[in-house]
Amino acid sequence: MTRRNGVSETRYDTIGRTYAATRRPDPRLAARLVQALGDARSVVNLGAGTGAYEPRDRLVTAIEPSRTMIQQRPRGAAPALQASAEALPLGHATFDAVLAILTVHHWSDQSRAFAEIRRVARRRAVFFTCDPALPGSWLTRDYFPMIRSRDRGRMPALHAFRALGHVESVTVPIPWDCSDGFLAAFWRRPHSYLDRRVRQNISSFAELTSAELEPGLWRLEQDLASGEWDRRYATLRALDELDCGYRLVVCELTGAI
């Protein structure tokens, strides 16, 4: 997070201006998240963004560091506080559960954020994240390996969540027509990655310099035009869903502060 004219700014103040256009909530993922929250009635949503996966039948408070993202939250969305996971403006043990969706890798201090989760939540923390131990998709293996290298350095290993308490991790296969355009969502729709708007709403792409981005884009465009991509990955066309490394991690909190 940086400051300009005395105002805190985050990466999403720049890249999040059209976020809602390509990052629409996928109902299948939403159902998994609601199930993981169990009977928790009060939920704090960390890195809440536009509020895509916030359950409407719970008392939700959103935490989002980017003013640009907060301004895109729809009418009727849960109240949002501009703050970071490392310094939650919330009282001790004030929520049943914490929800954190594809946000842990953006935290500047994961240990501090975990301590804050244990401080404000009474029972449970639910994360949608990616397992850095897995090899990644064709996208990062063949075309943008620098994305994989960077993400592996930021994504916490699944065992790191044990700092919060008892952990259960469940594989979340990504459907071929996933409506939430995160990094691996277009695994069966490779032409989508040639769309600038799709890329600018994926933080891993938005971080790349032109020198890093353009060679991979050129190779992908050439492989799609020549049919090489289809020859290499023809089997993907027959699949309805794929394990791209995403995991639902549910932590039953112990030793809350």
Image: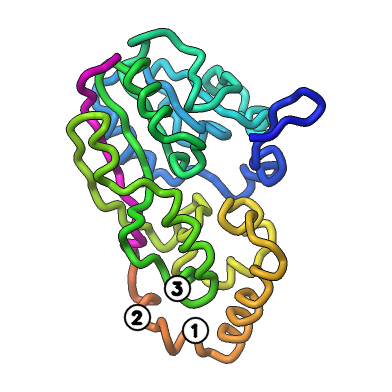
Q: Are marks 2 and 3 in contact (CB under 8 Å)?
A: no
Q: CA distance from mark 1 to mark 3?
A: 13 Å
Q: Earlier in the sequence, mark 2 or mark 3?
A: 3
Residue located beneath label 1 in the image? 229
N-terminal of the pair, mark 1 or mark 2, is 1
- Residue 252 pos. (x, y %): 21, 28
Residue at image x 52%, y 62%?
A: 147
Query: Residue at 60% across / 22% down in the picture?
Result: 82
Pinpoint residue 102: horizontal percent, then vertical percent. Answer: 45, 43
Label drawn at residue 141? 3
Neighbourhood count class around disc 2 (C-alpha, 10 Å): few under 14, some 14–19, many 20 upward:
few
Q: Amino acid at mark 3?
A: Arg
Q: Which residue is mark 2?
A: 235
Q: Give the quarter of the figure containing the C terminus.
A: top left
Mark 1 and 3 residues: CB-CB less than 8 Å, in contact? no
146 left or right of 135?
Answer: right
Nearest to the observer: residue 249 or residue 73: 249
Q: Considering only vertical position in the picture, is 201 above or below 190?
A: above
Residue 204 numbered mark, or none: none
**161 and 218: which is toward the camera:** 161
Q: Amino acid at mark 1?
A: Trp
Where, by quadrant of the figure, is residue 11 drawn? top right
* Viewer can see residue 38: yes
Instruction: Find the distance from the CA under tag 1 to the CA under tag 2.
Output: 11 Å
Q: Position of residue 201 (x, y in %)?
A: 62, 51
| Type of the residue with mark 2 | Thr
What residue span does the magenta drawing correspond to?
242-257
How far, Cα to Cα, is label 2 from label 3?
A: 17 Å
Q: How many marks?
A: 3
Q: Quadrant of residue 33?
A: top left
Characterize the local packing of mark 1: few (<14), some (14-19) or many (20 or more) Cα atoms within 10 angstroms: some
Q: Quadrant of the N terminus?
A: top right
